[in-house]
Amino acid sequence: MFSDTHGADIYSAAEKSGINKDEIIDFSSNINPLGIPERVKKSAIDSIENAIKYPDINCRELIKSISVAENVPEGWIFAGNGAADAIYRISFYIKPKRGIVTSPAFSEYENSLTAVGSIIEYYNLIEENDYKIQDDFIDYINSETELVFLCNPNNPTGQITNKGIIEKIIARCNELGTYVVIDECFLDFVENKEEYSAVNLLEKYNNLIILKAFTKIYAIPGIRLGYCMSSNKDVLEGLKVIGPPWNVSNIAQAAGIAALKEKAYVNETVGYIKLQREYLIQELSKLDIKIYESYANYLLLKIYDEINLKEELVKKGILIRSCSNYRGLGRNFYRIAVKSAEENKLLIKALKELKGKQ
Ligand SMILES: Cc1ncc(COP(=O)(O)O)c(C=O)c1O
C-alpha cells in the first residue's frame, strides 16, 4: 500500500469513518471547485472510442495546444502522467548528488530525490517570515547542488515568491550548472499570475524546468495530466527515455486539448477563489484559528486547542489535510482547500459546532 501521506484520500477516510466515500466533502485536495468544464468532460468521454488504439506517443496535438497557450516552442514541452510523473522523471534523469527542497513543500520532490539516493538539504521556511523564501536561499546552493525544487505558490503554505528572488536563484544555479524546477501547478489560481511566472525566463536559462498540471485548475486529478517545459533539449529527450512510453492516455490528451480552450473558465475560477478565500479567512478568524497569507486555492491553518481536527471533522463527513507529516509543521497545522460557497459554509458550520459556537 502507498502510505497515507497526501490529501485526497477519501478512500481511507471512508474505511475509517464508515461514511460512504462519495458523501465525504474533500477539503484535503486542492481541486477547482467549479468542477470539470463540460467541454473537457465531453472530449474525454468521446475519446473512449479511440481507446482501441495506442495514444500518440509524442502527444503531438496536445503539445501543439500547450505551445500556443504558453507561448513556448513545441520542442520545449514534455507531457506527463500528472505533474508527479514529470517530477520523478526529472529526479531520475538528473540523479543529483545533492538536491535542495524547501521545508515544508510538496513531499514528492523529497521522495523522488530519496528514490535516486540524493543527499537532500532543506531550506526552512519559517513562520516569522510568513513562510516566504528569503534572499539567503542563494547561500544554500553550492557546487555540489545539482537540483533545486521550488514551488510557486508553495504547497502547503500558499505563499508566493516574487520573480526577483526566483530569477536570482535560477541565475546562481545557472552559474554552477545546477538545474532548477519551479513547480507552477497552482499558479493558474493566482491573480496576475504573469507577474510571478518564470515561463519567460526559459529562453534565457537552460537550467530551468517549469512544471504545470491540468489536475488542479481543470479539476481532473483522476485523468492524470501534467507537463514540464525547458529550453534544454537534453533534458527533454532525457525525460522521454527515463520512463515508460505512452505515459499520457488518449483520454488525457483529448481532455488536455479541450481544457486549453477554456480561458473564460480559468478567469472565472480566479475570481471565485478570491471571493471564497476571503469568506473562509473572515469566518475562520472568528474561531480562534490562525490563518496564513495565501495566494492559492488553499489555506494553511494553525489551531490552538489539543483536538485532532482532521479526525473530528471526518466524523462529520469532512476531510481536511493534516499537515503533521510536513517537515517544519506540527500536529496543530492543517490545510484546507477553498471549495464552493456551499461546501465552505458547511465547513464553517462544522467548525462552529466543534468549537461550541453555533
Ligand atoms: C505542488 C504540487 N505539484 C505537483 C502535484 C502533482 O500533481 P499531479 O496530480 O498532476 O500529478 C501536486 C499534487 O498534489 C502538488 O501539490
Image (cartoon, grey):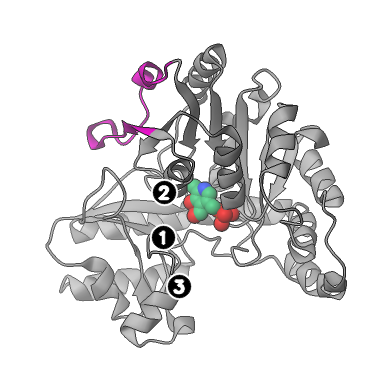
> Which mark is nearer the camera, 1 or 3?
1
- Residue 70 in magenta stretch: no
Which amino acid type is shown beneath numbered disc 3? Answer: Glu
Mark 2 or mark 3, earlier in chain: 2
Q: Is mark 1 within 8 Å of ligand 1?
A: yes
Q: Which residue is mark 3?
A: 342
User: How many C-alpha atoms fall within 10 Å of the one at disc 3: few (<14), some, or many (≥20)?
Assistant: few
Q: Classify mark 3: helix, strand or loop.
A: helix
Badge 2 marks a residue whose secondary structure is helix
Q: Is 245 on the left or on the right of 273, as rendered?
A: right
Image quarter where the N terminus lies is bottom left
Numbered label attached to residue 215 = none
Whole-number angstrom distance, CA of label 1 to CA of label 2: 8 Å
Q: Are marks 1 and 2 in contact (CB under 8 Å)?
A: yes
- Of the residues shown, which amino acid type is indicated by label 2? Ser
Q: Which residue is mark 1?
A: 6
**Residue found at x 73% / y 70%:** 41
**Crowdedness near tag 1: few (<14), some (14–19) or many (≥20) residues, C-alpha within 10 Å:** some
Please report the residue visible at 30 percent of the width from the left and 35 percent of the height from the top.
130
* Left or right: where 119 falls relative to 60: left
Q: Which residue is mark 2?
A: 107
- For label 1, the SS is loop
State which tag comes first along the sequence, 1 or 2.
Answer: 1
- Residue 21 at x, y = what percent? 45, 82
Q: Which residues are magenta?
A: 120-142
In space, the residues marked 2 and 3 are separated at their CA atoms by: 30 Å
